[in-house]
Image: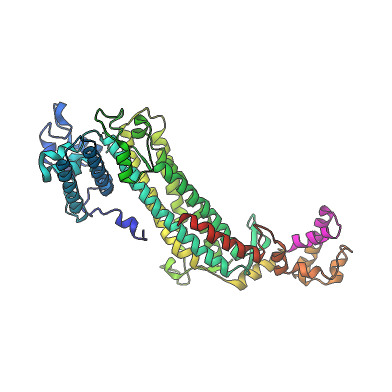
């Protein structure tokens, strides 16, 4: 799948009905809403649905996004009905040809969506019957919109998940390349946003890689629970027809079958799980954004990002604003909100399907679109940041970042850590007084605080020495970070 697939997965034309068109005058009277009992389910009704109610309850304004998946599901369902001798081969062939024509019309933007037909499912079925005649009415044998919509959401979300995983892999491989170039580029590592110890920029970038790697694992794992077939559960209890759900599952590429019909039509935990994972991922992107924003400030001056991710100010000519990371930081809030929406939507819902469930789509769409957009921006932006090597080095020098190294040096010479801590505190105080780095103090100056200090101490006070000393799995020593990049490349293959 390519970067545009999130667009191509939504083939809907711009003439779609907006979900906000609730005002009665926004609704065109259609033959089926003007004459009572004309709706597809209208048999037992004694008056036509109020036109406001029709618009208020319709989902076609947004669920038309499922059209391709809905038709794919219907083709599989019809094929299964044929194989189980519930429909004849020629009925199935006619239905499939008709459905393919409906899809062509939709993709060409040549489809007349009707609010009176409520949702994507009935719009498609109604048009099918227009095209192929009465046999179109047989398609709905042995199913319900309840299992149909649950199937559509899963097919759609599976595809979007794959697209998102692909973007994540692209972003991570870009970060591996960036880290590889900067295993020796020294920057301050922070705690409390105060200079703590020297690290390499490559090590910092590999921390981002690890966050994104776990995010990818979570999505891959959640995909297994998305990829289960609800179809065949019908309205809630199953169907009286001799269906074979294994056929439908195989045709649609589902790796399993929902085992209980009541659960299958009603739960949306797979969507909540996706949105939880998306929230954690957006939380990570917001942390990276925050660092980029800080680092781009004149006060840090640590990195540049390509101009295409920035904008200027209409009034302050000197400004270059980090709009893209700022927006991604802000968009995390939206995704957290959609998670809360979906959890609240499902809270306390009794079995089985309730109309409340129609409210699952817009939060999920917004979550997917926000996440996909943020990842598209990040996959191009983050691997293309350029560190300002000099400024990073200077900031590390200023922060007495090798103080812990001096303490560790003393400990190796038999000084207890607490005493070493005190010695180094005194040395740092002197360096601050003199306005120099620890490594600029003379041996005599250092020795006044402890006679355990020898002339080899300067090997440990350099930034390079400090980095190289942290030479174990997970440490910042350049050879460890090089190895982490090699391991990262191998681990990333799991998602290819
Ligand atoms: N538009 C509905 C939804 O999104 C489809 C299922 C409708 N089922 C029903 N019994 N009204 O949930």
* Residue 200 percent across, percent down from the top left: 63, 65
Q: On the image, which quarter does residue 380 sit in?
A: bottom left
Which quarter shows the C terminus? Answer: bottom left
* Above-or-below relation of 437 to 144: below
Q: Is residue 255 magenta?
A: no
From this viewpoint, is residue 119 visible? no
Q: Residue furthest right?
A: 451
- Residue under the point 83% across and 72% down: 442
* Residue 458 percent across, percent down from the top left: 79, 70
Which quarter is ligand 1 in?
Answer: top left
Which quarter shows the N terminus? Answer: bottom left
- Residue under the point 55% across and 62% down: 294
Q: How is the image coloured?
A: rainbow
From this viewpoint, is residue 364 visible? yes
* Residue 347 percent across, percent down from the top left: 42, 32
Instruction: Specify start and end residues of the magenta stretch as a single range.
Output: 402-426
Q: Nearer the viewer, residue 82 or 238?
A: 82
Left-right relation of 375 to 12: right
- Main structural element of the magenta stretch: helix, strand or loop? helix
* Above-or-below relation of 213 to 387: above
Left-right relation of 43 to 276: left
């Amino acid at each position: 799948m390519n970067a545009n697939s999130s667009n191509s997965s939504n083939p809907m034309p711009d003439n779609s009905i907006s979900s906000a068109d609730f005002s009665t005058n926004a609704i065109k009277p259609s033959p089926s809403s003007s004459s009572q009992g004309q709706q597809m389910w209208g048999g037992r009704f004694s008056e036509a649905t109020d036109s406001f109610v029709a618009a208020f309850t319709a989902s076609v304004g947004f669920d038309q996004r499922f059209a391709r998946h809905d038709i794919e599901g219907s083709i599989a369902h019809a094929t299964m009905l044929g194989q189980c001798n519930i429909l004849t081969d020629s009925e199935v062939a006619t239905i499939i040809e008709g459905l393919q024509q409906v899809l062509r019309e939709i993709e060409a933007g040549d489809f007349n969506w009707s609010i009176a037909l409520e949702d994507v499912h009935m719009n498609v079925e109604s048009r099918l019957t227009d095209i192929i005649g009465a046999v179109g009415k047989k398609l709905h044998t042995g199913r319900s919109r309840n299992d149909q919509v649950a199937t559509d959401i899963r097919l759609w979300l599976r595809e979007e998940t794959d697209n998102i995983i692909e973007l994540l892999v692209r972003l991570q491989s870009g970060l591996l390349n960036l880290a590889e170039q900067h295993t020796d580029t020294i920057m301050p590592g922070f705690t409390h946003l105060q200079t703590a110890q020297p690290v390499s920029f490559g090590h910092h970038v590999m921390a981002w890689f690890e966050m994104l790697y776990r995010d990818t694992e979570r999505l891959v794992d959640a995909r297994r629970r998305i990829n289960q077939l609800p179809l065949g559960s019908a309205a809630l209890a199953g169907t009286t027809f001799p269906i074979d759900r294994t056929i439908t599952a195989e045709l649609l590429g589902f790796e399993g079958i929902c085992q209980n019909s009541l659960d299958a039509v009603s739960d949306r935990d797979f969507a909540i799980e996706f949105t939880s994972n998306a929230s954690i991922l957006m939380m990570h992107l917001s942390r990276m954004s925050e660092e980029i924003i800080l680092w781009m400030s004149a006060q840090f001056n640590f990195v540049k990002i390509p101009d295409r991710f920035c904008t200027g100010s209409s009034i302050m000519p000197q400004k270059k604003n980090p709009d893209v990371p700022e927006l991604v930081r802000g968009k995390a809030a939206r995704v957290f909100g959609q998670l809360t929406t979906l959890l609240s939507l499902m809270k306390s819902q009794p079995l089985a399907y309730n109309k409340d469930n129609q409210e699952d789509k817009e939060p999920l769409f917004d979550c997917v679109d926000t996440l996909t957009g943020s990842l598209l921006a990040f996959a191009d932006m983050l691997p293309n940041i350029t560190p300002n090597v000099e400024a990073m080095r200077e900031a590390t020098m200023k922060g007495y970042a090798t103080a812990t190294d001096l303490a560790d040096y003393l400990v190796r010479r038999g000084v207890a850590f607490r005493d070493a801590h005190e010695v180094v505190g005194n040395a740092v105080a002197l360096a601050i007084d003199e306005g120099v780095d620890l490594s600029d103090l003379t041996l005599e100056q250092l020795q006044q605080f402890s006679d355990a200090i020898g002339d080899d101490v300067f090997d440990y006070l350099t930034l390079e020495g400090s980095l190289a000393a942290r030479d174990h799995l997970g440490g910042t020593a350049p050879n460890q970070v090089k190895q982490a990049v090699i391991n990262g490349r191998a681990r990333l293959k799991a998602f290819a």
